[in-house]
Image (cartoon, grey):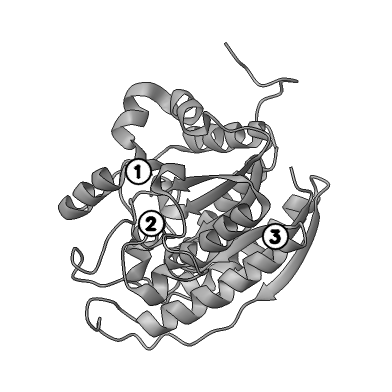
């Protein structure tokens, strides 16, 4: 795994339906993300925050809310992530709402194309984020990034990074999904996304789920994790704008992160949708940092090797 890490703050809630995710980067810093990573021997540079247009808080226009501003923020993020990868550093994007997954992952996909790497994207989320303007009346673009990455949506968004679609739907594994609109469900099936929803996790367990989601990777795979904090059960993670009951417990989330760490393939990460305005004494930010620590190899278990059958 890459030992040189760059933190990129993206303080905007431009694609969200509630204000506040713009404060996410600072809350993650206050929760100690840098020192926690450094305590594992990692070299961490905090690049500070990107800048972009303010949130005008307008109604959607032609089905998309704040389209021009979303394009601008994502273009800036795309370039920032690209620059880190070009310098062989691992970008950790501190969101910001999940519309930023577009700029981040389009840059990762571009890097993989340019370097001949295989891409795997784990999308940890309560939602499939596969909406289109035709399906959602809200027009909030944070519900659309996976669809946009797969080429569904307006050209200024789907074309960020120069290649449309930015990714093949076959590289995505979605985990923790439990809230999908009817029309969105149809699109997800048509696109061929592999979805491990909560029913699957309930029936098969997190260990089997992660074994499936991580299967088929090799030494040449770039693993990107897009971690929407609403993936977690709201009982443990109240600080998000779009809570959905029935998410992974603390132990399930830890196991998920530890199994990702065990692969040694993590090469880029998004931490999205943390909303300090809705949090309780920063506990959701602290939990997110705790889980990120596991993603980078903190083992909760006092064992020398990971348990395997
Ligand atoms: Mn999301």
Q: Is residue 194 left or right of residue 208?
A: left
**Is residue 8 at all visible to an observer of this figure?**
no
Report x, y in % for residue 277: 45, 70
For label 3, the crowd category at 10 Å Cα-Cα, with few meaning under 14, some 14 to 19 and many 20 or more, is some
Residue, far top: 309
Question: Quadrant where the N terminus lies?
Answer: top right
**Quadrant of the rendered image holding ligand 1:** bottom left
To which residue does mark 2 refer? 150
In the figure, 45 relative to 181: above or below? below
Residues under labels 1 and 2: Cα distance? Answer: 10 Å
204 horizontally vs 136: left or right:
right
Tell me, yes or no, if residue 305 can be seen here.
yes
Q: Residue at x 58, y 60 (%)?
A: 110
How many labels sit on residues?
3
User: 10 Å neighbourhood of mark 1: few (<14), some, or many (≥20)?
Assistant: many
Question: What is the x, y in percent for residue 51?
Answer: 59, 83
Residue for point 32% across, 23% down: 203
Instruction: Return the mark for residue 193.
Output: 1
Labels 1 & 2 near each other (Cβ < 8 A): yes
Measured Cα–Cα span from mark 3 to mark 2? 22 Å
Q: Return the residue at label 3.
A: 85
């Amino acid at each position: 795994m890459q030992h040189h890490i760059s933190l990129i703050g993206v303080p905007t809630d431009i694609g969200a339906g509630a204000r506040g995710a713009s404060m996410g980067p600072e809350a993650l810093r206050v929760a100690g993300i840098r020192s926690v990573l450094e305590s594992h021997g990692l070299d961490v540079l905090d690049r500070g925050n990107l800048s972009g247009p303010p949130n005008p808080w307008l109604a959607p226009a032609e089905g998309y809310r704040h389209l021009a501003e979303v394009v601008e923020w994502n273009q800036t993020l795309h370039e920032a992530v690209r620059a880190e990868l070009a310098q062989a550093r691992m970008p950790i994007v501190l969101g910001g709402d999940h519309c930023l997954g577009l700029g981040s992952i389009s840059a990762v996909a571009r890097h993989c194309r340019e370097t001949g790497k295989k891409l795997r994207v784990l999308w940890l989320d309560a939602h499939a984020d596969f909406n289109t303007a035709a399906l959602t009346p809200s027009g909030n673009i944070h519900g659309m990034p996976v669809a946009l990455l797969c080429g569904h949506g307006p050209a200024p968004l789907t074309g960020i990074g120069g290649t449309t679609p930015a990714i093949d739907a076959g590289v995505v594994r979605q985990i923790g999904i439990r809230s999908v609109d009817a029309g969105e469900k149809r699109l997800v099936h048509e696109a061929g996304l592999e979805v491990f929803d909560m029913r699957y996790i309930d029936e098969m367990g997190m260990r089997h789920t992660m074994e499936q989601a991580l299967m088929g990777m090799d030494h040449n795979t770039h693993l990107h994790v897009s971690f929407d904090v609403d993936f977690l059960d709201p009982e443990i993670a109240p600080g998000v704008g779009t809570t959905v009951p029935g998410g992974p417990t603390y132990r399930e989330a830890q196991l998920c992160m530890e199994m990702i760490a065990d692969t040694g393939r993590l090469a880029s990460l998004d931490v999205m949708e943390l909303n300090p305005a809705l949090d309780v004494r920063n506990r959701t930010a602290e939990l997110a940092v705790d889980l990120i620590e596991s993603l980078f190899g903190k083992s909760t278990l006092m064992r020398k090797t990971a348990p395997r059958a």
